[in-house]
Image (tube, rainbow, N blue to C red):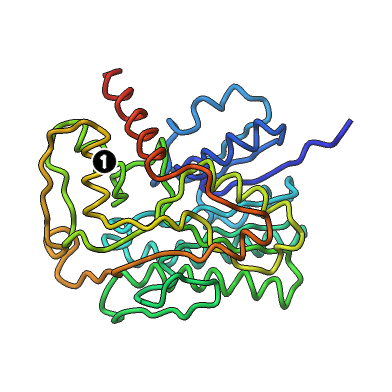
Amino acid sequence: MTKTNKTLVTGGAGFIGSHLVEKLLKSGEEVFVIDDLSTGSLKNIAHLKKNKNFHFIKGTILDSQKIEKLAKKVNQIYHLAAAVGVKTIIDKPLDSFLLNIRGTEIVLNAALQYKVPVLVASTSEIYGKNDKLPFTEESDRVYGSAYHNRWGYAMSKGADEFLALAYYREKGLPAITVRLFNVIGPRQTGVYGMVIPRFVQQALAGRPITIYGDGYQTRCFGYIDDVVDALIKLADNPKAIGHIFNLGSDEEISIKELAQKIKKLANSKSSIAFIPYAKVYGEDFDDMARRKPDLSKIQKFIGYEPKISLEESLKRIIDYYGKKQDAR
């Protein structure tokens, strides 16, 4: 009889975390989740509570004693807990900055005590205003003024990456870092500034689809199933230790085109409205024009290829929110 793998997922009640936990449980793992529910939700994990291999702990990653106790129980950690979304970062810059840096240090230190491998989730925000696309893992970071709260998040996640690499290089902790590019799917909320759930809900309700800025900014959206599968494959690959990986889709689309596509797929009569950034995020908001990953490294290590197209992703999300709307 094979021994059950025991895994800790920080932020496991969040959008990405809950899907990851679901997948790990299906593969027979015993999973411990810690989440303070500040942006995660019990609704995301309610269907998992009857599983004898699922354990939920309400708490913060800033609680070093709790994290140490959990690290002692497991043989793998996925560190996903962090400040989430542009709105959170703009509204609570100091809390976001400290949670990301202190929380990651606590998780890495606990992992080191018990020699537990860690996968640290980072972000495409890391690349900042760099305009040399596509971004490779070695690309420069170009941030705006320190007066712009937006860059505090990127800098804090940059510090997280530095910590993960330093713990690996200096202390021998098996650590992997993954830069996520705009992950989308069911359970994602638009409350914290995520664009697709907001557009879809507006389209289904017949309200104006509101684009912030001129809509010419571009992004790439990776579907949750592709992303979660890749996270698990990376964590299971010893050759990935000590490396940083881009993860997501490289299918680039402008936000204006995205709004038009969602309107069409949802058969919506919504109008499309443009709102200046200053009205939403304040006068000092700074944004990047384009964001697109080079996925050749992750393809080389685990054979990663996004399987689910943007169009198929949007259809699934529209269907998810449509059913939620019908159930009311």
Q: Image quarter for residue 280?
A: bottom left
The answer to which of 160 and 135 lies nearer the viewer is 135
Assign a secondary structure to mark 1: helix
Q: Looking at the picture, does residue 165 appear above or below residue 299?
A: below
Percent across and percent down for residue 52 are: 67, 25
Please, which residue is most extreme toward the top here? 327
Percent across and percent down for residue 40 are: 43, 42
Quadrant where the image shows the C terminus: top left
Q: Which residue is mark 1?
A: 262
Q: Residue at x 38, y 73 (%)?
A: 128
Quadrant where the image shows the N terminus: top right
The answer to which of 53 and 134 lies nearer the viewer is 134
Q: Residue at x 44, y 78 (%)?
A: 141
Q: Looking at the picture, does residue 260 appear above or below residue 49?
A: below
Q: Looking at the picture, does residue 312 appear above or below residue 322?
A: below
The answer to which of 136 and 224 lies nearer the viewer is 136
Q: Residue at x 30, y 70 (%)?
A: 288
Q: Amino acid under label 1?
A: Ile
